[in-house]
Amino acid sequence: MSEALARLEGVHKWFGDLHVLKGIDLEVRPQEVLVVIGPSGSGKSTLLRTMNLLEEPTEGRVWFRDIELTDVRTNLNEVRAHMGIVFQAYNLFPHKTALQNITLALEKVLGVNGEQAREGAMQELDHVGLAEKADAYPGQLSGGQQQRVAIARALAMRPNVMLFDEVTSALDPELIQEVLDVMKTLASEGMTMVVVTHEMGFAREVGSRVLFMDLGTILEEGEPRETFESPQHPRLRQFLNRVL
Amino acid sequence: MTTERGSQLDRPESPAEHRLARSAAVILGLGVASIGLALGGTVASTAARGIVPYRRLVEGLLSTPTAVILFVGLGLGAVAIAWGFASYRLMPTKRSRERAVAGAVLGIQAVVVGLIILAFRSFGNPELFIKLFFNAGVLEGHLGAFVRGAVNTIVLAFTGEVGGIIVGLFLAMLAMSKRAVVRAPARVYINFFRGTPLIWQLSVFYFGFAIGLGIRPAVDVGPIQLSAPYTIAVIVFILNTGAYAAEVFRAGIQSIERGQLEAARSLGMSYPQAMRYAVIPQAVRRVIPPLMNEFVILIKDTSLVLILGLAVGELELYTTAREGYSDTFNASFFTAAAIGYLAITLPSIWAVNRLERRLRSGLVGVGA
């Protein structure tokens, strides 16, 4: 077995007649920050969501460490508890406070007792700079704050890898930076991250590897600085010209 | 200016405008007075001599004071209509225009109501009508029966609704399964109970199962003693409401954004855990108003127990009224039943509307 944390092998995904992923092979190595870029509809979000099997591949296999997620006998709940994911739309539970959003899974999934769950949750809220918002409901927080709580919620589970699905795309421009700063800190702490994003500055600065996707395939892969400065594939050159 | 925001527009400026604004207040006063007299005044004057025996009501309606009140109301209404519609476009402020329009509209209502009462009083048969519909005398001695009837109506509807909610939640879970073999029986059940009339269901359970097959599920637990027909009514109301509640729950749960379930599942929660801790608590708020609407409908549908042979102590409002009617052939019993139903349903409707407003304004969204 390779030392990859997550691995995709020949992954295809169809939504009806739409062929969204066309045979993806990919390895996520420990402690790397893998940034996935590409135009809308290129399949990058779907790719990310197949990693914890929120999307089931139509074809191909998905591993987390040496556990095959696409094997029906695998207990997905157990695996997912070790993979954090943060969504574009935050998806905080609106009927629970920031603190309760975090303690819920700690108690119900990991079986941590109430007091310890509280401590763990407070620690993560502090980590994202929102300790004083512990008792606020999501509706009382800004988009940026909600997204940071969502990150804290995922981190509290002590995941081996964090998946970020366009986490700044729904945010007002002035709130984007606070979320990117949290992600930057995480990267510097050695967290393994897969980041689907339109933030090219972040990709270049924080990414350890960048993937360019278009029409369901990975067209180019490389070290971010190099890739941004001298893109090989014409589609990537065209894409970068448009977004930079 | 120290006036409140918005009131500047409502401030007449020249003396002529002041006069018009004052006249608008007079028009509104005329409108209020005309409907007050034509409706409230007539009713009060009709009942002024007492309501038992019913002849006092007839005398009251036909008396000179009632006629005077009626004609004054009609006259004031006519003035309000003419003056209001003639002048509302000239009004200098929004408030005075609205007052003039309101006065004229109230005037129309007063004239319509007044003319109907006048026609009824002059050309109809008020004696017979009041005797048959507003004859409080024949109701004497039946107050206890109506109170018992109202209690039975509430008991039947309440147990039906609560039991139906439990059945419905269970059915909704089955109906939302990703497995067709689990969904199918739930769909069959839901469609069957929604697709056949409640009165048919009561008939089959009572005539078919209880009388025909001899399945008589009477309840005799300590202080709670229910006859077989009463128990069957409760069971059928639960089964029927369960089918409707299942659809309400399904719609409520499916209206919660998919991301909520995904967020819970990706934290490692199982499907039942995700439902229980993340989705259902949010769905509950959305299903309360439609469930309460179902409850109001069920309150009225409990009257269908008339086809069952209920014992005297088990009659609800409608069957109580029917018993009274059969004894006397006087429809005042139905009038009393209507008052009973409204006394139960109006507060429920009011509560639903209030709750819906609160849910919309998001006040319930926080906490709980």
Image (tube, rainbow, N blue to C red):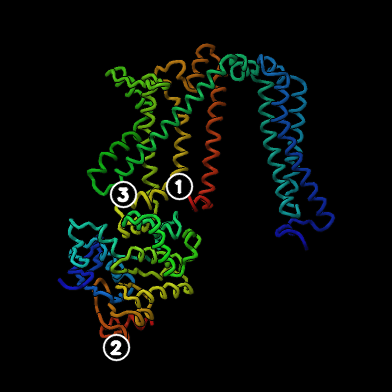
Q: Secondary structure at mark 3?
A: helix
Mark 3 sits on what residue?
B272
Write the residue at 67% across / 18% down: B51
Query: How many badges with numbers are in the image?
Result: 3
Label 1 or label 2, whichever lies nearer to me, is 1
Mark 2 sits on what residue?
A230
- Which residue ends up furthest to the bottom in the rendered image? A230
Where is residue A49 drawn, in percent x and y? 29, 65
Q: Amino acid at mark 1?
A: Arg
Q: Residues within 10 Å of mark 3 (few under 14, many from 20)?
A: few
Q: Amino acid at mark 3?
A: Pro
Mark 1 sits on what residue?
B285
- Classify the position of the N terminus of chain B by image quarter: bottom right
**Residue B234: numbered disc:** none
Q: Is residue A199 above or below residue B322?
A: below
Q: CA distance from mark 3 to mark 1?
A: 19 Å
Front one among A1 and B185? A1
Front one among A21 and A173? A173
Write down the chain letter for disc 3: B
Write down the chain letter for disc 2: A
Q: Secondary structure at mark 1?
A: helix
Q: Residues within 10 Å of mark 1 (few under 14, many from 20)?
A: some
Name the image quarter holding residue B298: top left
Q: Are marks 1 and 2 in contact (CB under 8 Å)?
A: no
Q: Is residue B162 above or below residue B55?
A: below
Q: Is residue B183 above or below residue B127?
A: below
Q: Amino acid at mark 2?
A: Ser
